[in-house]
Image: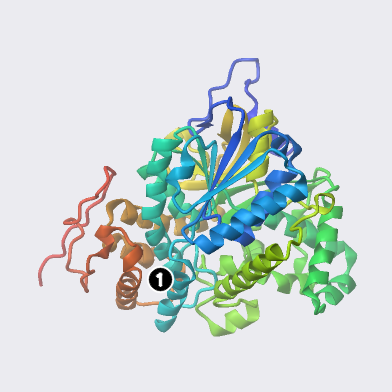
């Protein structure tokens, strides 16, 4: 965004001189809400730790909870579904949502009729599949931290998720074709790219909290650079995690009143803060001195090291970011120096399981799950998007959408139709992504390394072609910098066998060893462009 212009500049309906501006080519048109009851369908509602934030955000909005509201909950796990139902009822009482109706079913089709919004948080295969995403690559010497976006873990997470997402979209087109699908399911880039091509009639927006969480962290960093070393040193040594979290929350509340502004664009988990300002003043010159604050620098070494070389700060956590580039996880010394925790997501999953059991226990004892007067909004977007559509108040956010084609591309130096994370505006008329123009060349270049793998993974899912999956892993920066071609072949075969129960029929076929087999004999199962590779001549 040009200096001195607010984010709203991108969404003016008039050009200079008063002539109407053409609508963005990839605008998501949404119908005006005319029914009396707002119906929100949660798919994967059993992810209780996450959906608790979404429920609370929705019920805390007075304009939403004061009208008839139906929360329809779906999950394939009856125990988790019942916990989610109890949680929604509990929170409804806490926030005084007298017109709230909560319905639940393990059959999503029973709940879809008339849904206005569909929020998808499904985790196909659950913790068992996630363990395989880590354990099998580890046997080949491939370290992973999160494994949900790219690399071996992310690509096969997409492979087992694609059939479910496609089935969901088919049901949406049949039962609630006007609904907006808000996808939270990772890998965001691959999944959204797949759905943009496989289910083009579905109104889709990909949502993530990486941009807003990173912005909050940057505001804290800038504040602590002024505050000195004392507070942070004491804070990081606190053994009481609840007290530590309370201190951060208090700081974030104070920072909310300050006039910070940003402009961020790129792809999911790899978007760059192109502008970072406070009271209209550029904050990057201050961030260049981050190495003068060793405690802060060590807390986010991966991203600060990249920022000092690329010139811009990147979204997502340092553990996420380490997987998207070929510089860190291949070297034991760098893993230690950068403070990277391999296998971190498995630890997070176990913590979420413990928190789920705690929520169950509290619900059974009748403990209120929230206090309306002590509520603090989460980083998530759905409640604000829904409020903007119902009240016609414009809300600005970063969403994952199609980049468009040719001169209509939102980010000019990224490929046609890739999935980009870009500023968007939403009100009753729909979601309007902003045209960003060119990213800095070095930012676009490092993003392109990830888009190469995303494109081939999406084609693998569209064509149900296991050879495409192997090609995606070959071009993944982290995997390619760690394993040989032969090891990548073997790893891909092992993961195909391990994930077979969740894969589409075409991906369940045995993947032959070696490179003589042509992929040209595997036509796409969907009508989508395919680039055949010539068969290698016989020796």
Q: Which residue sits furthest left?
A: 538
Q: Residue 417 at x, y = what percent? A: 42, 42
Residue at horizontal 45%, vertical 38%? 404
- Is there any visible trace of residue 440 in the rendered image? no
Q: Position of residue 465 (x, y in %)?
A: 27, 58
Residue lying furthest top = 18
Identify the residue at horizontal 85%, vertical 59% (top origin). Answer: 250
Dot 1: element: helix
| Colouring scheme applied when the structure was drawn | rainbow
Location of mark 1 (residue): 480
Q: Is residue 61 above or below residue 487?
A: above
Q: Describe residue 144's horizontal placement relative to residue 423 as left or right.
A: left
Q: Give me the residue at 59% from left, 75% from top.
A: 347
Judge by depth and name the residue closer to the eye, 493 or 335: 493
* Residue 170 in view: yes
Report whether 156 appears left or right of 7. Answer: left
Asked which quadrant contains residue 142, the reply is bottom left
């Amino acid at each position: 965004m040009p200096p001195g212009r607010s984010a709203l500049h991108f969404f003016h309906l008039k050009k200079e001189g008063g002539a109407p501006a053409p609508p963005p080519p990839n605008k998501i048109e949404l119908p005006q809400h005319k029914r009396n009851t707002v119906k929100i369908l949660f798919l994967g509602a059993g992810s209780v730790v996450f959906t608790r934030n979404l429920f609370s955000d929705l019920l805390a909005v007075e304009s939403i909870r004061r009208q008839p509201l139906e929360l329809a909950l779906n999950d394939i796990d009856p125990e988790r579904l019942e916990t989610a139902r109890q949680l929604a009822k509990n929170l409804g009482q806490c926030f005084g949502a007298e017109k709230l109706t909560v319905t639940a079913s393990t059959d999503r089709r029973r709940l879809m009729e008339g849904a206005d919004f569909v929020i998808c948080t499904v985790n196909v295969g659950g913790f068992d599949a996630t363990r395989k995403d880590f354990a099998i690559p580890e046997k080949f010497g491939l370290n992973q931290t999160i494994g949900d976006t790219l690399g071996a873990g992310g690509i096969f997470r997409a492979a087992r998720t694609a059939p479910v997402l496609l089935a969901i979209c088919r049901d949406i087109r049949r039962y609630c074709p006007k609904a907006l699908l808000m996808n939270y399911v990772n890998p965001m880039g691959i999944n959204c790219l797949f759905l943009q091509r496989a289910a083009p009639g579905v109104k889709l927006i990909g949502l993530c909290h990486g941009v807003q969480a990173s912005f909050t962290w940057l505001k804290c960093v800038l504040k602590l650079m002024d505050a000195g070393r004392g507070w942070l040193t004491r804070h990081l040594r606190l053994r009481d995690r609840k007290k530590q979290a309370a201190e951060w929350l208090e700081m974030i509340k104070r920072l909310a009143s300050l006039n910070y502004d940003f402009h961020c664009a790129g792809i999911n988990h790899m978007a760059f803060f192109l502008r970072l300002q406070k009271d209209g003043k550029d904050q990057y010159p201050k961030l260049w001195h981050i190495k003068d604050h060793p405690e802060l620098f060590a807390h986010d070494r991966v991203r600060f090291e990249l920022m000092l070389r690329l010139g811009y700060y990147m979204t997502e956590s340092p553990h996420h970011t380490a997987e998207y580039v070929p510089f860190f996880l291949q070297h034991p010394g760098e893993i230690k120096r950068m403070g990277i925790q391999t296998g971190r997501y498995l630890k997070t999953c176990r913590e979420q399981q413990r928190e789920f059991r705690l929520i169950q226990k509290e619900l059974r004892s009748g403990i209120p799950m929230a206090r309306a007067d002590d509520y603090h909004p989460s980083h998530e977007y759905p409640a604000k998007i829904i409020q903007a559509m119902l009240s016609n108040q414009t809300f600005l956010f970063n969403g994952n959408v199609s980049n468009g084609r040719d001169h209509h591309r939102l980010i000019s130096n990224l490929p046609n139709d890739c999935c980009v994370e870009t500023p968007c505006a939403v009100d009753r008329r729909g979601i309007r992504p902003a045209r960003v123009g060119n990213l800095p060349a070095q930012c676009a270049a490092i993003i392109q390394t990830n888009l190469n793998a995303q494109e081939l993974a999406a084609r693998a899912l569209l064509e149900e072609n296991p050879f495409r999956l192997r090609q995606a892993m070959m071009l993944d920066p982290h995997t390619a910098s760690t394993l040989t071609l032969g090891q990548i072949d073997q790893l891909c075969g092992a993961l195909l066998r391990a994930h077979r129960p969740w894969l589409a029929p075409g991906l369940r076929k045995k993947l032959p060893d070696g490179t003589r087999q042509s992929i040209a004999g595997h036509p796409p199962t969907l009508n989508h462009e395919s680039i055949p590779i010539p068969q290698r001549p016989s020796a």
